[in-house]
Image (cartoon, helix red, strand yellow):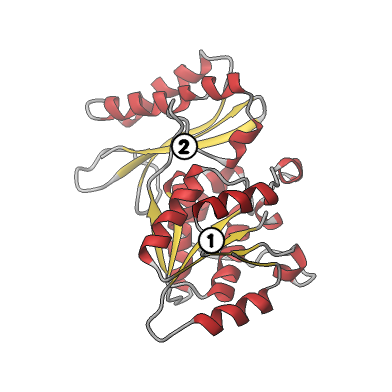
Amino acid sequence: MHIFNGKAALIAYLTSIKTTDSTIGFVPTMGALHQGHLSLMEQSLVENDNTVVSIFVNPTQFNNPEDLLKYPRTLEQDVEKIAGLSNNIIIYAPTVDDIYEGNVLSQKFDFDGLEHQMEGKFRPGHFDGVGTIVKRLFEIVSPTNAYFGEKDFQQLQIVKKMVEKNDLTVNVKGCTIYREANGLAMSSRNERLSPAEKQEAAFIYQTLQTAKEKFENESVEAVSTWVENAFSNNSAFELEYFQIAEEATLLPCETKNETKKYRAFIAVFINNIRLIDTISLN
């Protein structure tokens, strides 16, 4: 297994193994790896000649300094998990300075309005940070295909838009959400939940599933009101937002249109730990 902490050495190695028709799959992560991350790597291994995984907690996408401080950092365990999957995966675990070269600032992006919805409303500057790090990693790794989980569906759409607007050649692939046995979407933040809180958090996906059923016959307003009431009656949670939006534009759905695809998005706090989830409604 090859592990690189500096981009110069990584680029030199990738250049040495690259051929005219070889492909590179890339899975960008912030570490604290779980089975969802490993499933992205598995798909990359099947579909590409080489696979690169980055492990980097990106400071510019955290609008909350406390959240950045508490974000789990488990590099040694992450490397063990990757080794258990395959010894052929190339790991890039850079320092902040290797990425930002002493200038830890976000580039400003225009994502055609995608950045102003949901996460963008509640986490100012978050998607500028996401765009900055993903663009930089794409420039370093030069991947053929890049893999992202659909749990962060808004982020997935934003990365696709960034690739389109910057004429990058990478193919961005969205992958199915990997869930715990109780339905909780796998997330690195789940590491901060107690066993009891993990069980409680199953309520999030259960609520989304019921919302999907209701969406078939009820109005957007009625479904939204039902979800808000469900969380207001459950003292374990604080609902930050619930929104039904068009998949393509992420704009809020007001009146259903049978020709469009819709998705429900949710963000909640449990014991000050922020969790997000999403479900397709079509």
Marks 1,2: beta carbons within 8 A: no
Task: State the image coordinates of residue 282 (x, y, percent, origin top left).
Answer: 25, 40
Residue at image point 69% right, 57% down: 60
Q: Residue furthest bottom?
A: 20
Instruction: Name which residue lies at 40% across and 86% down.
Output: 20
The residue lying at 51 percent from left, 33 percent from top is 241
Residue 206 in the image: state x and y as whole percent. 40, 24
The amino acid at mark 2 is: Asp
Within 10 Å of disc 1 (Cα), the crowding (few <14, some 14-19, many 20+) is few
Left or right, 171 with reference to 166: left
Counting residues from the N terminus, which is met first, the one under dot 1 or under dot 2?
A: 1
Instruction: Report whether 256 appears left or right of 59.
Output: left
**Mark 2 residue element:** strand
Which quadrant would residue 67 be assigned to in this image? top right
What kind of residue is marked 1?
Asn
Which element is circle 1 on? Answer: loop
Image quadrant where residue 140 sits: bottom right
Give how far across and how far down residue 238 sits, in percent: 58, 24
The quadrant of the image that shows the N terminus is bottom right
Task: Say if 23 sits above or below 95 in the image.
Answer: below
**271 in relation to 54, above or below:** above
Name the residue nearer the viewer: 120 or 7: 7
Q: Which residue is mark 1?
A: 87
Circle nearer the viewer, 1 or 2: 1
On residue 277, the disc is 2
Residue toward you, 152 or 141: 141
In this view, 72 is above or below 1: above
Image quadrant assignment for residue 129: bottom right
